[in-house]
Image (cartoon, grey):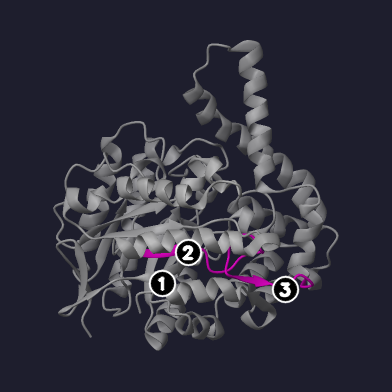
């Protein structure tokens, strides 16, 4: 079988151009609070499960979670709905123990081996995405940042460690036919010196190419994969670019249901065209690695309309995409646990007083109060950046006083049964979303 290759501004497999239509499997190998329906970051969630019960129970819980979240049944469904690419976010902890960093964990390779087996069996391409690195590549929760500061960019030892890890992964999977490539780093942001990201990309590319000439390397831009001015040139022949597209996050008016749909579509396209300029600028193929919207179960047609308008633009400009996301606790995923499942009962309890928007609201109020009283001259940029640190404080309080308290209500047996809620046979899915995907997929 031929490997997918970069040829000019397109992806090719053999002599045939290929476009990708797929999904991200978020909150599987890198847990995100808003998708799991429970507060704090990946490491804090894992730490709390281990402290409330035992470390052994915590490890068994997350082993079960990993195995239940993605199974044969999920891949059968994905193949059926026309998905030909899965972007798979993962945490560096999958391969590295911070207390024994010299030895890569076999657990990570075991999980990736299983993933590659599924990819071959169902002929669906896989794109591993490094979502969390030591110290955090951005200040937000999805990089498992517990301080609000992207320390990754301040310590060369962290960046060298990730280059070595990527090299080991590439050496293991260099012959995998349905491995599309390597998404080197998810959504970098707040890099103190611009050249550090380009240096990191160059070093990781060199490390991978020492062992793997077969697979494509994907680079994301600064400012959460939207600003590519940090990339000045690309010398590796098999390198592509991947951006993220969330127009309603940066312009919340667009999510207003009274907003004229045709006007919204025009704004969507304007934002999109600005992002895809990189295809011409670098003469490389591009992939939209993330795009998606919170799903309003009370008004599903509105959400489906947003997705349809987005995919229509992608198809118009022949851009490959992986929507965010496949499965979660009834927020943004196509597939979700049933409302009467043990996991959703836990989420319902916590949802009585928490959602991830509350974190943002608290942090903003804290910073406005602090700056208003003591630092009235603080710039909007400083206030925005420091809100991430304020949110980190909130996470630590949530870990101790909210998440811990909810888990203490459960027995060890009950907590070990929670992951079964994510088994495909215990889940539902939005048929309207599936129909829309099938309509716009390239398969």
Residue 111 spot, x, y in % from top left: 48, 74
Residue range highlighted in magenta = 320-341
Quadrant for residue 240, please give it. Answer: bottom left
**Mark 1 crowdedness (10 Å alpha carbons): few <14, some 14-19, many ≥20:** some
Q: Which numbered disc flags the more N-terminal residue, 3 or 2? A: 2
Say if residue 185 shows up in the picture.
no
**Mark 3 crowdedness (10 Å alpha carbons): few <14, some 14-19, many ≥20:** some
Quadrant for residue 102, please give it. Answer: bottom left
Which is more toward the observer, 48 or 74? Answer: 74
Residue 253 spot, x, y in % from top left: 55, 41
* Residue 67 counted in the magenta span: no
Above or below: residue 9 compared with residue 342: above
SS at circle 1: helix
SS at circle 3: loop
Q: Which numbered disc flags the more N-terminal residue, 3 or 1? A: 3
- The residue beneath circle 2 is 308
Q: Which numbered disc flags the more N-terminal residue, 2 or 1? A: 2
The residue at 60%/64% (across/down) is 301
- The residue beneath circle 1 is 440
The residue at 66%/12% (across/down) is 373
Residue 338's disc is 3
Above or below: residue 433 compared with residue 183: below
The residue at 71%/59% (across/down) is 49
Above or below: residue 95 compared with residue 152: below
Decide: marks 2, 1 in contact (CB < 8 A)? yes
Q: Which is closer to the viewer, label 3 or label 2?
A: 2
Which is more toward the observer, 378 or 273? Answer: 273
Above or below: residue 335 compared with residue 145: below
């Amino acid at each position: 079988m031929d490997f997918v290759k970069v040829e000019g501004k397109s992806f090719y497999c053999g002599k045939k151009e290929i476009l990708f239509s797929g999904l991200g499997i978020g909150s599987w190998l890198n847990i995100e609070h808003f998708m799991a329906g429970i507060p704090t970051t990946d490491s804090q969630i894992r730490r709390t499960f281990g402290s409330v019960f035992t470390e052994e129970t915590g490890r068994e819980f997350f082993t079960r979670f990993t195995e239940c979240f993605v199974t044969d049944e999920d891949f059968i469904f994905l193949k059926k709905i026309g998905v030909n690419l899965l972007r798979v976010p993962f945490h560096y902890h999958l391969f590295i123990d911070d207390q024994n960093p010299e030895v890569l964990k076999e657990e990570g390779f075991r999980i990736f081996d299983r993933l590659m087996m599924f990819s071959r069996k169902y002929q669906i391409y896989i794109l591993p995405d490094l979502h969390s690195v030591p110290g955090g590549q951005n200040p937000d929760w999805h990089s498992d940042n517990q301080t609000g500061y992207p320390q990754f960019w301040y310590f060369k030892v962290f960046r060298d460690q990730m280059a070595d890890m990527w090299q080991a992964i590439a050496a293991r999977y260099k012959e995998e036919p349905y491995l599309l490539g390597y998404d080197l780093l998810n959504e970098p942001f707040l890099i103190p010196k611009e050249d550090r990201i380009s240096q990191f990309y160059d070093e990781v590319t060199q490390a991978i190419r020492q062992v793997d000439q077969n697979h494509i390397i994907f680079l994301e831009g600064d400012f959460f994969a939207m600003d590519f001015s940090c990339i000045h040139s690309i010398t590796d022949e098999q390198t592509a670019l991947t951006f993220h597209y969330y127009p309603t996050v940066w312009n919340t008016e667009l999510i207003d249901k009274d907003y004229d749909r045709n006007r919204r579509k025009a704004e969507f396209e304007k934002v999109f065209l600005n992002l895809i300029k990189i295809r011409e600028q670098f003469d490389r193929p591009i992939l939209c690695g993330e795009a998606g919207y919170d799903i309003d179960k009370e008004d599903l047609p509105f959400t489906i309309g947003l997705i349809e308008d987005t995919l229509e633009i992608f198809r118009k400009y022949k851009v490959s995409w992986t929507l965010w996301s496949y499965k979660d606790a009834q927020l943004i995923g196509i597939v979700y646990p049933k409302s009467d499942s043990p996991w959703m009962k836990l989420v319902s309890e916590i949802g009585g007083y928490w959602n991830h928007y509350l974190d943002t609201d608290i942090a903003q109020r804290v910073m406005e109060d602090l700056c208003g009283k003591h630092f009235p001259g603080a710039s909007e940029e400083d206030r925005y950046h420091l809100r991430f640190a304020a949110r980190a404080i909130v996470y630590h309080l949530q870990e101790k006083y909210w998440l811990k308290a909810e888990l203490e209500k459960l027995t060890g047996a009950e907590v070990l049964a929670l992951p079964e809620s994510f088994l495909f046979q215990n889940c539902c899915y939005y048929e309207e979303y599936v129909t829309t995907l099938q309509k716009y997929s390239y398969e």
